[in-house]
Image (cartoon, rainbow, N blue to C red):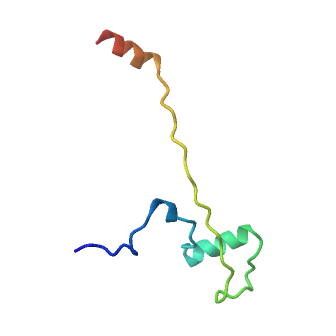
Amino acid sequence: MTMDKSLKVQAGAIKSRNVLTRAERISRLQELDKWTEDSNVIGMAKVRVQKVSLKKKKKVKTEETAASKKKK
């Protein structure tokens, strides 16, 4: 069975989403000083989640690997 084209995710369509659990949201709001112990859980503020993109690390050649390649 094929998937409807409206359900497919394209690479450009991926955005930051708010998918934190309630405990994670409360801890994040406490870090931002927007949450107190008296605050109500119902109707709490939204917390934006930043999408983190990691850069690939370059491999560093060591003397041992370079020497072993020369021997082969």
**Looking at the rendering, which quadrant does residue 27 occupy?**
bottom right
**Left or right, residue 31 beside residue 72:** right
View extreme (top): residue? 71
Of residues 28 and 46, the one drawn nearer to the viewer in this rendering: 46
Percent from the top left, x then y, of residue 55?
55, 43
Q: Is residue 30 left or right of residue 24?
A: right
The N terminus lies in quadrant: bottom left
* Residue at the right extreme, as displayed: 33
Q: Quadrant of residue 24?
A: bottom right
Task: Return the x and y of residue 54 as percentages of the image width and height.
Answer: 55, 48
Taking depth in this image into account, of 52 and 39 the one nearest to the observer is 52
- Identity of the residue drawn at 34% across and 15% down: 69
Residue 60 is situated, as x and y percent measured from the top left of the image, at: 50, 26
Eyeballing the image, is 39 above or below 2? below
- Residue at the spot 58% in from the left edge and 78% down from the top edge: 22
Along the viewing direction, whichever of 5 and 43 lies nearer the viewer: 5
Give the residue displayed 33% in from the left and 75% down from the top. 4
Residue nearest the observer in this picture, 56 or 1: 1
Q: Position of residue 37 (x, y in %)?
A: 73, 82
Q: Is residue 37 above or below residue 68?
A: below
